[in-house]
Image (cartoon, rainbow, N blue to C red):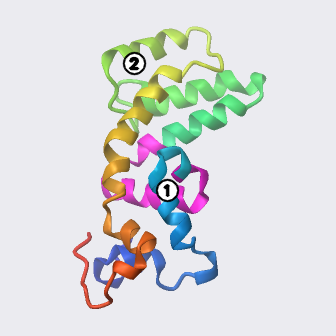
Amino acid sequence: MCVENGGDMFNCCFIGKRSNLLPSSLEARSWDSSLDKLLQSSYGTALFRAFLQKEYAEENLDFVLRVERYRESQPKKREREAWKIYRTYIAIGAHHELNLDILSRKVTELAMITPHVSTFDTAQRRVVSLLQNDAYRRFLRWSVYLRLAYPEQYTGNEQEAEG
């Protein structure tokens, strides 16, 4: 997490970065159409991760992305990867345990009897729903995102109280 620049998250995320690598404000504004659109952009995903880190919730995004990679993995490697994902995010007391409802956790536990490509579907749908209805909406109001997407509305004299 950035603590440089007096805790100003905007400057931390953008100042000193090569401007030709930053997304245009038009691209950044397109991220407000859907969480999927945001996650299609590597920069959007990275910025959303920075936001989730600030909220101590990045394990949700990590889980969603890891399950996507799991689905694309070779069948021979899939069972071992399923157990890694389960032990990291689903199991009670896991290092990055997700805040899942009992039903989602139980369905996933039962699917682990014989791991397959859809083993984590229920848990992933639950986490994506939480991200879409909560963190993503707050992200769209986050001053760092707003300053990137709507730079014309930002006056350089404002100081941001981000931490």
For the N terminus, the image quarter is: bottom left
Residue visible at 54% across and 31% down?
85
Query: How far apart are the alpha carbons under marks 2 and 1?
Result: 28 Å
* For marks 2 and 1 on the same chain, the one whose residue lies earlier in the sequence: 1
Outermost residue, bottom direction?
157
Q: Nearer the viewer, residue 77 or 43?
A: 43
Residue at left offset 58%, top offset 82%: 19
Task: State the residue in front, 75 or 28.
Answer: 28
Identify residue for label 2.
Answer: 104
Is residue 122 visible from the viewing direction of this image? yes
Instruction: Please give the range of residues in magenta.
Output: 38-61
Whole-percent x, y for residue 47 in the image:
47, 62
The C terminus, quarter of image: bottom left
**Relative depth, front residue between 162 and 138:** 138
For the residue carrying disc 2, how many other residues have a C-alpha within 10 Å: few (<14), some (14-19), or many (20+)? some
Q: Quadrant of residue 65?
A: top right
Please, what secondary structure does the residue beneath circle 1 have?
helix
The residue labelled by disc 1 is 31
70 vs 88, left or right, is right
Locate residue 14, reporting x and y percent.
47, 78
Please name the amino acid that badge 2 sits on.
Ser
Q: Is residue 51 depicted above or below 5 in this figure?
A: above
Q: Is-magenta flag for residue 145?
A: no
Q: Residue 101's x, y, as percent?
A: 31, 21
- Label disc, if present, on residue 8 of the rendered structure: none
User: Which x, y percent locates residue 145?
Assistant: 40, 66
Q: Main secondary structure of the magenta part?
A: helix
Q: Seen in the image, is 37 located left or right of residue 49? A: right
